[in-house]
């Protein structure tokens, strides 16, 4: 099973478990620091993840394998304004950028909820490559 974990500081990682034990952590293309690896002691067992998430204020979501298509992006982003221009921006992205754009949506939306900032139009999200910031 895989989970997105988003910390209070906005840092996110993908946790991979096999048979209840942590098998891997992917910090999603950011430079890691030694402090980030302290997380392993809190999430080593899958059964402890939910309790520790509450205790430390982390957001946890089940990671889903996803198709890389504009329609899937449009559905997950869920801000239905100016679809044609958003799709034009989507077509200009490389496949790896498209994957990252989709994968970053839960992190982006969690940050918006925390800060109270308004959600960008999808075309702006894609144009600004928010997942790279």
Image: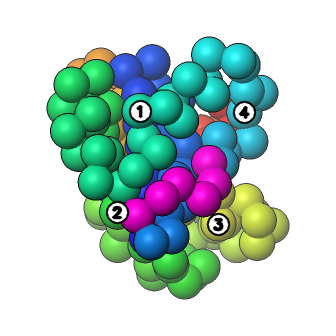
What label does residue 42 carry, if any? 1
- Where disc 1 sits, the SS reads helix
Cα–Cα span, label 4 and label 1: 21 Å
Quadrant where the N terminus is found in the figure = bottom left
The reply to whether callout 3 and callout 4 are in contact (CB within 8 Å) is no
- Where disc 2 sits, the SS reads strand
Can you identify the residue that label 2 sits on?
62
How far across and how far down the image is residue 80, in percent?
A: 30, 63
Nearer to us in this view, 129 or 96: 96
Cα–Cα span, label 3 and label 4: 16 Å
The reply to whether callout 2 and callout 1 are in contact (CB within 8 Å) is no
Nearer to us in this view, 19 or 27: 19
- Callout 3: 10 Å neighbours few (<14), some, many (20+)? some
How far across and how far down the image is residue 93, in percent?
A: 75, 63
Marks 4, 2: nearer the viewer: 2
Can you identify the residue that label 4 sits on?
30
Magenta stretch: dominant secondary structure:
strand
Marks 3, 4: nearer the viewer: 4
Cα–Cα span, label 3 and label 2: 17 Å
């Amino acid at each position: 099973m895989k989970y997105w974990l988003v910390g209070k500081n906005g840092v996110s990682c993908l946790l991979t478990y096999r048979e209840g034990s942590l098998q891997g952590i992917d910090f999603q293309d950011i430079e890691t620091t030694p402090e980030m690896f302290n997380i392993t002691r809190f999430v080593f067992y899958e059964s402890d993840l939910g309790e520790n998430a509450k205790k430390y204020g982390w957001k946890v979501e089940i990671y889903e394998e996803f198709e890389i298509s504009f329609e899937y992006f449009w559905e997950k982003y869920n801000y239905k304004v100016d679809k044609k221009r958003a799709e034009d921006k989507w077509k200009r992205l490389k496949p790896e950028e498209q994957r990252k754009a989709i994968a970053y949506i839960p992190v982006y939306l969690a940050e918006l909820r925390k800060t109270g900032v308004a959600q960008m139009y999808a075309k702006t999200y894609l144009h600004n490559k928010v997942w790279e910031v």
